Amino acid sequence: MHPSWLKALLTPRKALTPDQQRAVDLIAAIDDGGIPLNPARVNDIARRLGLEVATTAPVQETIERIRSVLAGAWQ
């Protein structure tokens, strides 16, 4: 089951940008049990959301930062 903030994202009040939609899709896939196999893709999504991400940053840390950005965007 998705967290309530993610459900709110899936029924947004305004249209999501393509970059925001990619981030929402990534987080939803992870929450459904998926494992991000490509750290470069995760980093690209984070950067497109405006985050600075080192190439050496742990993927899990970057995912948590993406979650924070998404949660903050719709509060």
Image: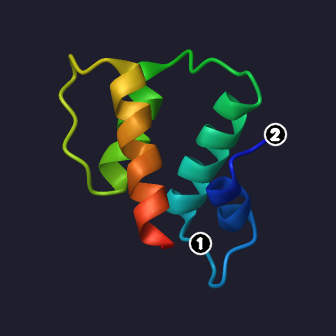
What's under tag 2, amino acid-wise? Answer: Met
Q: Residue at x 22, y 35 (%)?
A: 53
Q: Residue at x 62, y 84 (%)?
A: 14
44 sits left or right of 2 in the view: left
Pair 2/1: label in front: 2
Q: Position of residue 73 (x, y in %)?
A: 44, 69
Kindly check if marks 2 and 1 are in contact, taking CB atoms under 8 A apart as contact: no
* Image quadrant in which the N terminus is located: top right
Mark 2 Cα-neighbour bin, 10 Å: few <14, some 14–19, many ≥20: few
- Residue located beneath label 2 in the image: 1
- Residue located beneath label 1 in the image: 16
- In the displayed structure, 60 sits above or below 48; it is above
21 or 69, which is in the foreground?
Answer: 69
What's under tag 1, amino acid-wise? Answer: Leu
Distance in Å between CA atoms under marks 2 and 1: 22 Å
Q: Quadrant of residue 62?
A: top left
